[in-house]
Image (spheres, rainbow, N blue to C red):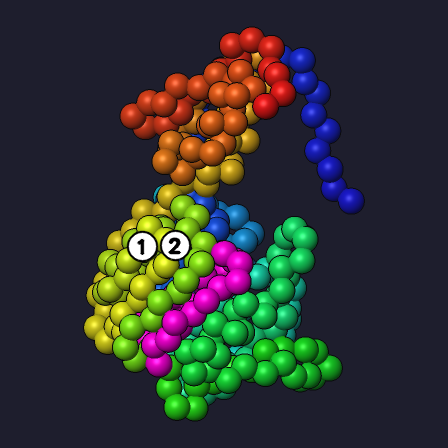
Amino acid sequence: MEAFKIKGGNPLEGHVRATGAKNAISKMLVASLLSDKKCIFKNVPHISEVETTVRLCQEIGMEVQWDHDGGTIEVITKEVKSSYVPLNFSGANRIPILMMGALLGRTKENIVVPTVGGCNIGKRPVDFHIKALEALGAVVEYRTIKKERAYFAHAPEGLRGAIIELPYPSVMATENAILAACRAKGRTAIRGAAIEPEIIDLILFLQKLGVVIYVDVDRTIYVQETKTFYEVEHTVITDRIEAACLGMMGIATKGKVFVEGAQQPHMITFLNKLRQINGGFAVKDNGIEFFYQGPLKGG
């Protein structure tokens, strides 16, 4: 097993830039499959999670030009060449399950996706996804293919708008419902939706793409059927978790670290807790400075 051995003892000082949020760009890459238009994304991190998602989308027919050094990726899916995600992607991450929502309205073929993987953060069942898609008119089955389990989904009579009640504000179930609703006839209301910053960024991207979509104060997301799409250029939000970790490294070592790109609106809860434990921070125009200002205390 690989491991990092870190020798500490010195205050960390300096300026560092947080990268784009993988949990935003990965979902937007899948969302771009909704249309046949060119999408350009900026502030894209060059990490394995994004690489895996790109390979998944390429299996569907996406053409990709990725400037790793510049953090820009240009994609276009002129046609869906395959609705079958190879089973060797089983367990790679949790993105394959979103392929159902993105492709159900674009192809009449059976969509086949492998079982999901990703971070082992408790139980994260996909039944919320399936019930949401079924409410929109999809038929989803769990079968065995080549000795592997996979999900089969299609919409024999097309997708139709519906009222979806999520029993829990699941991030990916919310995203799956949003993607499917974009091509569903009429209007869809997703109640009890998750509204994390990454979902809001996805919504902003979809609005640029041509989708009429908005979030109500009661955590209901409304999505209107979309027939016309547009070319898009979108800058991905900063990874708030990475920004918080970089900042805490400065505080924990009694130093001072400026995290360029850290965005206060996306880190309100973290910054409140940081204030409660006597962690120092100052919000600037282009980032947040984190610094040690005295002994930390329980929050």
Quadrant of res 164: bottom left
- Say what secondary structure mark 1 lies in: loop
Residue 299, relative to residue 268: is it above or below?
above
Task: Give the x, y percent position of residue 188.
Answer: 34, 71
Placement of 85 over or under 3, stated as above or below = below
Q: Residue furthest right?
A: 1
| Marker disc for residue 216 | 1
Q: Which residues are magenta?
A: 160-183
What residue is at 47 percent from the left and 34 percent from the top?
269
Please rate how many residues cluster around mark 2, counting C-alpha atoms within 10 Å: few if below 14, some from 14 to 19, many from 20.
some
The answer to whether residue 67 of the structure is visible from this angle is no
Give residue 121's mark: none
- Of all residues, the one furthest to the top in this rendering is 294
Identified by mark 1, the residue type is Asp
Image quadrant in which the C terminus is located = top right
Residue 149 included in the magenta stretch of the image:
no
Q: Give percent across and percent down for residue 147.
A: 73, 82
- Left or right: residue 7 compared with residue 74: right
Residue 164 painted magenta: yes
Is residue 244 visible in the rendered image? The answer is yes
The reply to whether the C-beta atoms of the residues labelled 2 and 1 are less than 8 Å apart is yes
Residue at figure coordinates x 34%, y 77% from the top left:
161
Q: CA distance from mark 2 to mark 1?
A: 6 Å
- What residue does disc 2 label? 219
Closer to the camera, 212 or 244? 212
